[in-house]
């Protein structure tokens, strides 16, 4: 009897598209959430920094 | 009917692993010397621009560290000191490290150019490329002189700090560059003496592995001479005051005494390598003392 198309071949490495279990899904989501929070904080800090740089440049331009 | 068992799927790398990729401990010295280069400059820039320049130096160093770890993942896996890093430990895939390093490096150079000037951005770009291409890719696995030439990469920050503040390069920041450049060989060879087996296991041609301990000890002693000359030169050339001169002479004499002890000794099989560890520890403190002294001196005698 032939195997269905989506069955893994014997000896094949696990497919990256393979569905993770519930515990794995939760761990992945948790990791993604923490990365997203850090990314959001960094982007916020970057916006504040760019604002500060712009103000400093404008002030320096006015002084000259 | 077929049954499939759940296979473990790799988690995406944690943000802490990306942070570890930037070698935060190495970054401390880079940031400090860059900050001192900026503070020693005769020009003051807006605090937010100064902060951005230092941030860019830190990010550039982090990018260089990330690309170094991307390229050397195989070597890191063979050394105890580095086997727990994100790539050899399997907590991150190599492509993520490459993308992170290239992205962070490009970002740091562009931000430096926008916030300060093109000269500082250019030197920052050269320092990142020098560390990655010249030191990591070209020299490290080929010659025991790897850290002598590669040491230039770590010597750029005071130049970048000065250039960010003034827009040009002068004699003093070049001397600060020379101090770090000439300090690197005795500093790293002291480390290599007590980490010799690790480097040998990884096949890295560090001087003690290729030429033996005797040659390395002699080289430590010899390289200390030009380093001492460079350390005292700012005072001797009248670019700093007596405060820096005094601190530099005393700190350099201590360095020279420790280096002399290391260069003259011979060790047995199970030697604890205490003088070598002492020289390594002092060499780190020495650089902090010298650069701190030059800033305080410039401020006091300004």
Image (tube, rainbow, N blue to C red):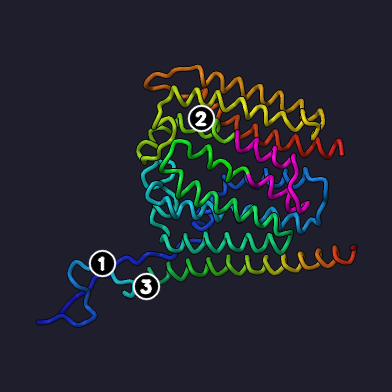
Query: What residue does disc 1 label?
Result: A13
> What is the chain identity of the residue bearing mark 1?
A
Q: Residue B108 colored magenta?
A: no
Expressed as whole percent of the image width and height from the top left, the position of residue A60 reads 85, 63
Query: What residue does disc 3 label?
Result: A22
Expressed as whole percent of the image width and height from the top left, the position of residue B245 reads 77, 27
Q: Distance between the residues labelled 3 and 1?
A: 21 Å
Q: Toward the viewer: B37 or B122?
A: B122
Left or right placement of residue A21 versus residue A48 in this view = left
| Residue at x 55%, y 64% (from the top left corner) | B103
**Helix, strand or loop at mark 3:** helix
| Residue B202 lies in quadrant | top left
- Image quarter where the C terminus of chain A lies is bottom right
Q: Residue B164 colored magenta?
A: yes
| Residue B301 lies in quadrant | top right
Q: Toward the viewer: A11 or A19?
A: A11
Q: Which of marks 2 and 3 is in front?
A: 2
Expressed as whole percent of the image width and height from the top left, the position of residue B37 reads 72, 44
Range drawn in magenta: B156-182
Q: Toward the viewer: B264 or B92?
A: B264
| Residue at x 41%, y 58% (from the top left corner) | B91
Total numbered badges shown on the rendered structure:
3
Q: Which of marks 1 and 2 is in front?
A: 2
Q: Toward the viewer: B64 or A30?
A: B64
């Amino acid at each position: 009897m032939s195997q269905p198309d989506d069955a893994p071949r014997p000896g094949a490495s696990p497919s990256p598209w393979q569905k993770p279990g519930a515990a794995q899904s939760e761990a992945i989501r948790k990791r993604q959430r923490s990365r997203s929070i850090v990314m959001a904080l960094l982007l916020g800090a970057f916006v504040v920094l760019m604002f500060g740089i712009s103000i400093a440049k404008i002030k320096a331009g006015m002084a000259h | 009917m077929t049954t499939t068992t759940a296979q473990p799927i790799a988690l995406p790398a944690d943000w802490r692993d990306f942070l570890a990729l930037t070698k935060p401990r190495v970054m401390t010295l880079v940031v400090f010397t860059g900050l001192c280069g900026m503070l020693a400059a005769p020009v003051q820039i807006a605090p937010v621009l100064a902060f951005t320049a230092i941030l860019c130096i830190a990010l550039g160093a982090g990018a260089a560290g990330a690309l170094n770890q991307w390229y050397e993942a195989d070597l890191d896996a063979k050394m105890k000191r580095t086997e727990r890093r994100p790539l050899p430990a399997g907590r991150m895939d190599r492509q993520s490290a490459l993308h992170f390093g290239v992205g962070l490096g490009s970002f740091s150079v562009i931000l430096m150019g926008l916030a300060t000037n093109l000269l500082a951005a250019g030197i920052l770009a050269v320092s990142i490329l020098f560390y990655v291409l010249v030191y990591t890719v070209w020299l490290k696995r080929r010659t025991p002189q790897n850290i002598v030439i590669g040491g230039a990469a770590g010597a750029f920050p005071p130049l970048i700090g000065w250039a960010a503040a003034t827009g040009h390069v002068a004699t003093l920041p070049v001397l600060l560059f020379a101090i770090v450049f000439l300090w690197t060989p005795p500093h790293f060879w002291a480390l290599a003496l007590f980490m010799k087996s690790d480097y040998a296991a990884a096949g890295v041609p560090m001087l003690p592995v290729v030429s033996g301990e005797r040659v390395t000890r002699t080289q430590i002693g010899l390289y200390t001479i030009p380093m001492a000359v460079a350390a005292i030169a700012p005072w001797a050339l009248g670019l700093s005051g007596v405060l820096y001169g005094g601190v530099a002479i005393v700190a350099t004499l201590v360095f020279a005494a420790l280096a002399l002890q290391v260069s003259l000794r011979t060790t047995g099989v199970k030697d604890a390598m205490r003088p070598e560890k002492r020289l390594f520890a002092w060499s780190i403190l020495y650089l902090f003392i010298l650069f701190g002294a030059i800033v305080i001196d410039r401020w006091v005698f300004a």
